[in-house]
Amino acid sequence: MTTPPDDRSFRREMATAYRSGWHFIDLVTAIPHSGDSLMVTVFGEPVVVTRDDDGDVRAYRCLRRPRGAPQPVRCAIRYGMIFVNLDQREQQLVEPAAPAAPRTLSATPRSA
């Protein structure tokens, strides 16, 4: 029989295993107009996703300290979906590589 992890080890595991990646929030259609916002909780942290006046989608971590300004969170739009990354380390959402141009292979040798 195994014992459940204590709260400290569980938080540490969540921080290292889950918070370091990109996480799906919602579809872009959830905030269609400038000034629209969406409040979500990602691994226990409140995050506000908003569309600014330029139409860009931005995400902010809501800090619970006095006079704490919202902290920007990395946000990306892919295929009409909003993703955020709470990790402070530098990471990028990997773009799929462009497929190589198709080549035609011939079974007959070229004539010189």
Image (cartoon, helix red, strand yellow):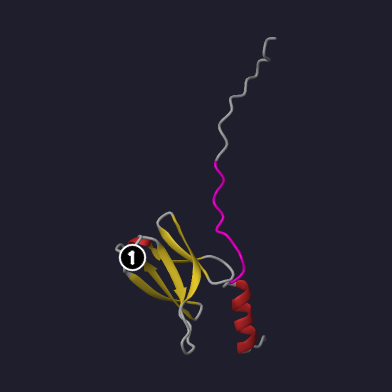
**Segment tinted magenta in the rendering:** 88-98
- Give the tally of numbered discs: 1
Q: What percent of the width, then of the height, locates residue 35?
A: 31, 68
How far from the left and from the top, in percent, is residue 2? 67, 85
Q: Residue at x 60, y 63 (%)?
A: 91
Camera sees residue 5: no
Q: Is residue 22 left or right of residue 49?
A: right
> Where is residue 47 drawn, in percent x and y?
44, 76
Q: Nearer the viewer, residue 86 or 105?
A: 86
User: Left or right: 105 with respect to 83?
Assistant: right
Residue 59 versus residue 9: which sits nearer the camera?
Answer: 59
Q: Residues within 10 Å of mark 1 (few under 14, many from 20)?
A: some
Left or right, 48 with reference to 9: left
Residue at the extreme top of the image, as rendered: 112
Q: Quadrant of residue 38?
A: bottom left
Residue at image position (33%, 61%) is 29
Give the dominant element type of the magenta stretch: helix, strand or loop.
loop
Task: Please say whether residue 91 is one of the residues in the magenta stretch.
Answer: yes
Residue 93 in view (yes/no): yes
Identify the residue under disc 1.
30
